[in-house]
Amino acid sequence: MNRVFVTGCLLLLCLGARAQRRILLLDSDTHKPIKEVSVATGNEPVATSNAKGIVSLSMPFDTIRFTHVNYSSEKLYQKEVGDTVYLFPKEHMLPEVTVRELPPKVKARLKGWVAQAAAEGAAMAPKGVASFDLASMMDRRKRRDKKHLKKAKEVLEKWDRKKTE
């Protein structure tokens, strides 16, 4: 009696348990996971991929469709779907651009503006030997690196003196 009861319980558990299928979605160029891919079986969306590009499906399917804004849609049959599916990025074509030469008057104005800006920049540049820069005074790494460089030069000079002796 107990064997029949245990066998019946195991049979019900096996029927109730569904096999979950995990599919990894990757970019075909970079081989990086793609998040937020919409997965649909038939006409109904079933799941969305997580940040690691993984989708878990608990229902059986005949065909499955993967869609994403930046990738071409893929429709596959169950036998074609493996553990990993690669999606191809969409090509975004820009309209044709025409480049023309500037009229001579506009070129002359631009040259004048550039010359004026250069003159103003030169006038604003610090004059003299030293200039004041608060950011470089506060930079600890620069001072530390100067000390390390000085010590390294001293050590190298000692080695050079030892070699010549």
Image (cartoon, rainbow, N blue to C red):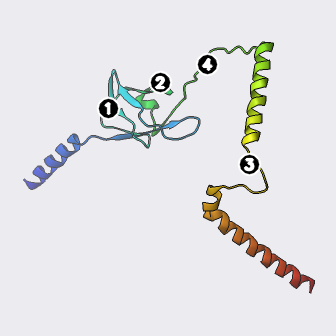
- Left or right of 19 on screen, residue 111: right
Residue bearing mark 1: 60
Point out the tag, 2 or 3, that comes first from the N-terminus: 2
Q: Secondary structure at mark 2?
A: strand
Residue bearing mark 3: 126
Q: Secondary structure at mark 4?
A: loop
Classify 10 Å Cα crowding around label 4: few (below 14), some (14-19), many (20 and above). few
What residue lies at 92% left-to-right and 87% top-to-bottom? Answer: 165
Residue bearing mark 2: 73
Front: mark 3 or 4: 3
Q: Where in the figure is residue 6, as x and y percent of width and height? A: 14, 52
Gap between marks 2 and 3, in whole Å? Answer: 60 Å
What residue lies at 27% left-to-right and 40% top-to-bottom? Answer: 18
Point out the tag, 1 or 3, that comes first from the N-terminus: 1
Q: Where in the figure is residue 117, as x and y percent of width and height? A: 73, 32
Point out the tag, 1 or 4, that comes first from the N-terminus: 1
Say how many tags the image has: 4
Q: Secondary structure at mark 1?
A: loop
Q: Which of the two residues, 57 or 11, is positioned nearer the viewer here?
A: 57
Residue bearing mark 4: 94
What residue lies at 79% left-to-right and 24% top-to-bottom? Answer: 111
- Left or right of 155 on screen, residue 65: left
Q: Which of the two residues, 58 or 111, is positioned nearer the viewer here?
A: 111
Circle 4: residue type: Leu
- Residue 88 visible to an observer of this rendering: yes
Classify 10 Å Cα crowding around label 3: few (below 14), some (14-19), many (20 and above). few
Q: Quadrant of residue 45?
A: top left
Is 118 situated above or below 74?
below
Is 103 situated above or below 27?
above
Classify 10 Å Cα crowding around label 1: few (below 14), some (14-19), many (20 and above). few
Gap between marks 2 and 1, in whole Å? Answer: 20 Å
